[in-house]
Image: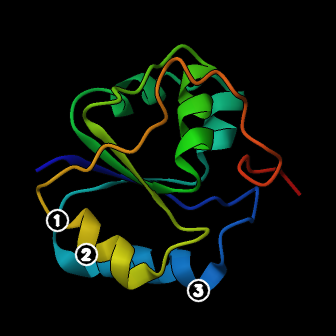
Amino acid sequence: MPRILYCHCAYAQVVPPDTKEEVLRQLCDSGVAFDAVADLCEMAARKDPALKRYAEGDVKIAACYPRAVKWIFGGVGCKLNNETTEVLNMRTEQAEYIMDTLLTDDISPNLPDDNDARKPTEEELPTAN
């Protein structure tokens, strides 16, 4: 099973509260192992070395836009593997879909290609309030 990383997006507050609360509740109730962080953006701002560990191996990340997550990790030198990373967007997807996807062994990689150097738009990149 891939590593599951849940971002609570505590500081940017761009993810609907109902969605992130429901995903977290169901993850806790599921009995599967997962890592939960308060805010990936804040971790990147602090250059938290834990990001490197989260970027290794097969990983499913519940956070926001795949492009933004890729830039968050890449901005601190922690390259996510395009072939073994799936990002579930809690800003746009329903909790039921996110949970169904997180709890499967299959990974559907969805990071943008490395040669796509376009920075995320303001709507794609979380902002702190």
Q: Element under label 3? A: helix
Element type at mark 2: helix
Q: Amino acid at mark 1?
A: Val
**Residue type highlighted by circle 2:** Asp
Q: Nearer the viewer, mark 3 or mark 2?
A: 2
Q: Are marks 3 and 2 in contact (CB under 8 Å)?
A: no
On screen, residue 53 above or below 10: above
Residue toward you, 21 or 71: 71
Q: CA distance from mark 3 to mark 2?
A: 17 Å
- Left or right, residue 120 beside residue 113: right
What is the distance, in whole Å, between disc 1 and disc 3 at their CAs? 21 Å
Q: Residue at x 17, y 65 (%)?
A: 32
Say which residue label 1 marks.
Answer: 32
Lower position in the chain sequence, tag 1 or tag 3: 3
Q: Position of residue 76 (x, y in %)?
A: 60, 18
**SS under mark 1:** loop
Horizontal and vertical percent for residue 67? Answer: 58, 40
Write down the quadrant of residue 83 in the picture: top left
Mark sitting on residue 18: 3
Residue 42 horizontal/vertical position (percent) = 69, 40
Front position among marks 2 and 1: 2
* Among the two numbered marks 2 and 1 on one chain, the one whose residue lies closer to the N terminus: 1
Residue at 35%, 78% in the rendered image: 97
Along the line of sight, which residue is nearer the eye, 126 or 109? 109
Distance between the alpha carbons at the discs numbered 2 and 1: 13 Å
Identify the mark at residue 100; answer none if there is no mark.
2
